[in-house]
Amino acid sequence: MKIQLKFFASVREALGVADETVTLPDGIVTVGDVRGWLRARGGVWAETLAEGRALRMACNHVMTDPHTRITEGCEVAFFPPVTGG
Amino acid sequence: MPVRVQTEDFDLTTEVAQLRARNPAIGAVACFVGTVRDLNDGSTIASMELEHYPGMTEKALEAIVDEAQRRWAGIEVLIVHRVGKLAPLDQIVLVATTSKHRGDAFASCEFVMDFLKTEAPFWKKEETEQGARWVDARESDDAALARWGVASGNASRDAG
């Protein structure tokens, strides 16, 4: 499955990447799976996306949780807690 | 949908005039304007950069307007949020709500701000004398949203 990834704010800076298109291996079916798969890249990926780190995620422009299932061509984003207003 | 994300400044009087135009049913307008302070967490702020998630931000703000209108029937809501580089004294955000009577206008205006603080994808980076730093989310903002019976997504510490 091919999906779009987006990273914002401190997460984007730590990873050094703003967006990326990836082809996922079989078995990666939720947003949480994607986070874990990216963490397996090691280095800053493992650190920035580590379990327990405050991280928010969105799927197709809607705030979501790790259990949300991803679909072909969807846009998954990871970012720190929001601080607008 | 009365939601705008822009780099330009806004004028409160003009915005409220447009919101009220041709609607004699409105008897109350409540407004909140958020501005950039020169001091935060003990550091002097030279400037601030507001980042957002183009495409999602507008959708998130529209969802907040929908939720407010579901809770307070008949209100109108306007949200204008600035992005880009801002300096102390600059305006950041405007929330204006209208209703027949003041109670709904006051309450919905505060609700929209509390919701926006924890559910709209904006991030602030401050330029201080010690260098640039990302502003951390505040637990007090989660508590503010909790008063409306809504759990803040910022507060969740998921397991991965």
Image (spheres, rainbow, N blue to C red):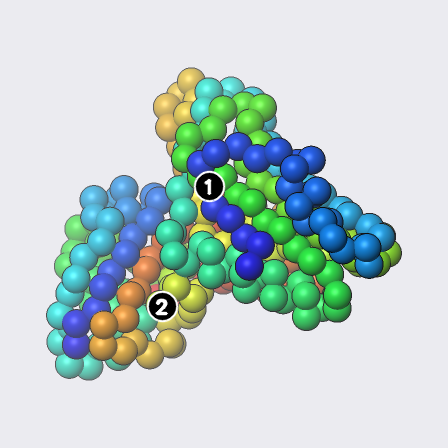
Which residue is at the front of the view, A82 or B51?
B51
Does dot 1 land on a helix, a strand or a loop? Answer: strand
Find the residue positioned furthest to the bottom.
Answer: A27
Q: Residue at x 13, y 76 (%)?
A: A25
Horizontal side, residue B139 vs residue B71: left or right: left
Residue type, label 1 = Gln
Residue A4 image position (x, y, % from top left): 23, 64
Residue B40 image position (x, y, % from top left): 55, 28
Q: Which residue is mark 2?
A: A59
- The quadrant of the image that shows the N terminus of chain A is bottom left
Residues under labels 2 and 1: Cα distance? 24 Å
Check if mark 2 and mark 1 are on a common chain.
no
Q: Residue at x 47, y 50 (%)?
A: A82
- The quadrant of the image that shows the C terminus of chain A is top right
* Residue B152 in view of the camera: no
Tell me where residue A24 sits by quadrant: bottom left
Residue type, label 2 = Cys
Q: What chain does mark 2 sit on?
A: A
Residue A77 image position (x, y, % from top left): 32, 60
Residue A50 sits above or below residue B82 on the image: below
Which residue is at the front of the view, B138 or A59?
A59
Q: Residue at x 13, y 70 (%)?
A: A23
Q: Which residue is mark 1?
A: B6
Q: Residue at x 19, y 81 (%)?
A: A27
Horizontal side, residue B96 vs residue B43: left or right: right
Residue B18 image position (x, y, % from top left): 66, 46
Tell me where residue B56 sits by quadrant: bottom left
Residue A70 sits above or below residue B7 on the image: below
Q: Are marks 2 and 1 in contact (CB under 8 Å)?
A: no
Q: What chain does mark 1 sit on?
A: B
Residue B44 sits above or below residue B1 on the image: above
